[in-house]
Amino acid sequence: MQGHGEAGLTQLRQGLAAIVAVGQELSRPFGLLLLAEVAGQVGQVAEGLRLLAETLTVLETSGRGDLL
């Protein structure tokens, strides 16, 4: 999706929502990191930082802080 950052960001959000909807919580931190990276690439720096903070929270509350 090179050159289509906003569309890619939307597709990533939809994909992550679908993964979480079926109970696949283990994939959530990785999906959040991908979203954060793309958000930064399309100039949404504040959103990217918010997503990184959410990833940190998810890892810490799930007891998977060792992945940091």
Image: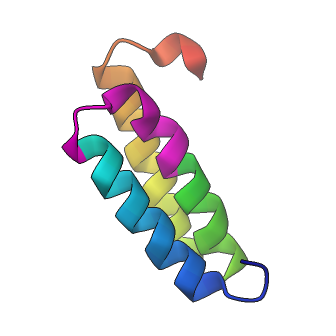
- Vertical arrangement, residue 67 with respect to residue 52, above or below: above
Inspect the magenta stretch and tell me whether residue 60 lies in it: no
Please determine whether, in this image, residue 38 is positioned above or below residue 51: below
Residue at x 60%, y 54% (from the top left corner): 34
Name the one closer to the observer, 10 or 68.
Answer: 10
Residue lying farthest to the right in this orientation: 2
Q: Is residue 62 visible?
A: yes
Magenta run includes residue 22: yes
Q: Is residue 44 visible?
A: no
Residue at image position (20%, 46%) is 21
Against 9, residue 26 (above or below) is: above
Give the residue displayed 31% in from the left and 19% down from the top.
62
In the image: residue 18, left or right of residue 52? left
Q: Position of residue 39 (x, y in %)?
A: 58, 72
Q: Is residue 41 left or right of residue 68?
A: right
x then y, percent, for residue 32:
48, 49
Q: Which residues are magenta?
A: 21-32
